[in-house]
Amino acid sequence: MASLPFKLEENDIKETFEEYGEVSSVKLVLDKETGRKKGFGFVEMPDDEQAKKAIEDLNGLEIYGRAIAVTQAEEKAGGSRGGRSGGYGNNRGGGYNKGGYNKGYQDRGSDNH
């Protein structure tokens, strides 16, 4: 997933994804020098069908005024990433639940954080 608002936390994302099914892991990528979020991350879901549904529903969803990008992560050379959802230009993953973010975050989107 990419184009994420910087105020989103891993726990917020996990709770949202769990509405689609089991979430194995959530990882927001941080800048190594500053420790700040870089605006993209990964969500791993063990069930491929649940992950596909999350991708389908959430790609392009607007959160805090930003349309997020959610795509299927591709296999990495030498291994498989089965069940991972989401991604952006470098084939990494993540996803969001429309219901959770529309209800929980869109209402707070005007606070300009």
Image (cartoon, rainbow, N blue to C red):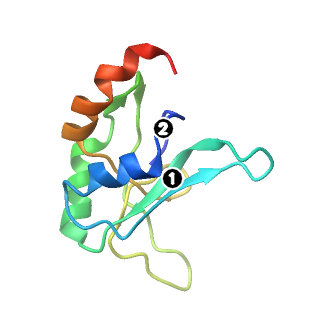
Residue 67, image x and y in percent? Answer: 39, 30
On the image, which quarter does residue 108 sit in? top left
Q: Is residue 102 left or right of residue 26?
A: left
Q: Residue at coordinates 41% horizontally, 37% vertically from top-left?
A: 68
Comes first in the chain, label 2 or label 1: 2
Q: From the viewer's perspective, is residue 51 above or below residue 48?
A: above
**Vertical placement of residue 7 versus 33, above or below:** above
The dot on residue 9 is none
Determine contact: label 2, label 1, CB under 8 Å: yes
Residue 34 shown left or right of residue 9 in the figure: right
- Residue 78's image quarter? bottom right
> Residue type at mark 2?
Leu
Whether residue 85 is visible to the viewer of this picture, yes or no, is yes
Position in image of residue 99 (x %, y %): 18, 38
Q: Looking at the image, which residue is at 23% across and 49% down?
A: 56
Mark 2 surroundings: few (<14), some (14-19) or many (≥20) residues within 10 A: many
Q: Between 100 and 51, which is closer to the camera in this rendering? A: 100
The amino acid at mark 1 is Gly
Say above or below: 55 vs 39. below
Q: Residue at x 23, y 72 (%)?
A: 47
What element does badge 2 sit on?
Answer: loop
Category of crowding for the residue at label 1, using alpha-carbon neighbours closer than 10 angstroms: few (below 14), some (14–19), many (at least 20): many
For mark 1, give the secondary structure: strand
Q: CA distance from mark 2 to mark 1?
A: 8 Å
- Which residue does the image show at 43% across and 63% down from the upper left? 73
How many labels, in total?
Answer: 2
Specify whether residue 55 is in view: no
Residue bearing the label numbered 1? 41
Residue located beneath label 2 in the image: 4
Residue 46: percent from left, percent from top: 29, 74
* Residue 107 picture location, percent across and down: 29, 21
